[in-house]
Image (cartoon, helix red, strand yellow):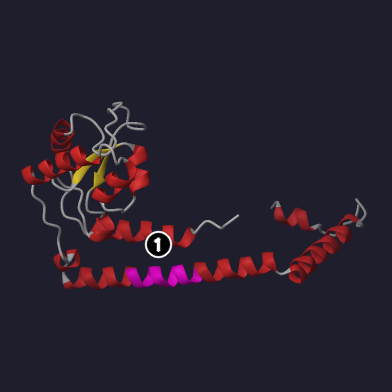
Amino acid sequence: MPRIKQFPRLNYYFTRGIQELLAEGALTQGEWSTILAHFEHRCAFCGVADTGIPRTGLVADHLIPAIEHGELVVGNTVPACHDCNDLRGKIDWRIFLQDAFPHDAAPRIKHIEAYLGAFPYQRPSDPASRLTLAERTEYQRILQDWELLLTRARKLRRCNQTTQTNPRLTSSLRTTRGQRFTAARALPVSSNVERPWSRARR
């Protein structure tokens, strides 16, 4: 069974989050209501109706992904069901519609394009340019710290995989642990010698 690619996903969420920190403003409830009304309270991609329940209803989705400097504002935000939001990820919305809903893609693309015409949006080319010199320095330091942390995590993961895939090393570790456990069990019950598990419980 292939291993799950934890680190690309982890890095994606960090990068996305740090980009959202640079975004100006936020979507107001009134703006979100306007967007929902434009799409008749349906998912812009599959057309499913809003349940009105936060856990299962429609969510705000970026047309231009946050990782590409897209902001959660009118003109770049559409309602999406949880399934479409998860499946699409950062795929171009037109390509997603054509691949996921080929029979309904054309009218839905036209509907979204009409929305974009009504609410034009221009993504910032460099959101970091909005920061002061001190803020930009701190922002760069955060990115550098993240790279160091990710490198350490990958190194730890490789060490763990080496241990799991090296039969001799794994067998040696099991033997050592077994010997320690056997020796501990051999101690008399009334002994004052401290047992390994008694220390662990303190």
**Magenta portion: prevailing SS class:** helix
Q: How many marks?
A: 1
Where is residue 99 shown, x and y percent of the image? 32, 46
Residue 44 or residue 98, whichever sits in front: 98
Specify whether 191 is left or right of 127: right
- The image quadrant that residue 46 belongs to is top left
Circle 1 crowding by C-alpha within 10 Å: few under 14, some 14–19, many from 20? some
Relative to 176, residue 4 above or below = above
Horizontal side of 70 relative to 168 (left or right) equals left
Look at 88% across and 61% down and name the residue there.
183
31 is higher (above) or lower (below) than 120: above
Residue furthest to the front: 103
Task: Tell me which amino acid carries mark 1.
Answer: Asn
Residue at 33%, 43% in the rendered image: 100
Q: Please name the residue shown 20% across and 56% down the image.
A: 23
Q: Quadrant of residue 185?
A: bottom right
Residue that appears at 27% across and 50% down: 95
State left or right for residue 137 relative to residue 56: left
Residue extent of the magenta highlight: 143-152
Which element carries disc 1, helix, strand or loop? helix
Rendering coords of residue 71 (x, y %): 20, 52
Whether residue 84 sits left or right of residue 165 in the image: it is left
Quadrant where the N terminus is found in the figure: bottom right
- Between residues 110 and 42, which one lies in front from this camera angle? 110
Residue 169 pos. (x, y %): 74, 70
Q: Is residue 46 shown above or below 179?
A: above
Assess whether residue 114 is covered by the magenta stretch: no
Q: Which residue is mark 1?
A: 11
Q: Nearer the viewer, residue 117 or 191?
A: 117
x, y (%) of residue 172? 79, 69
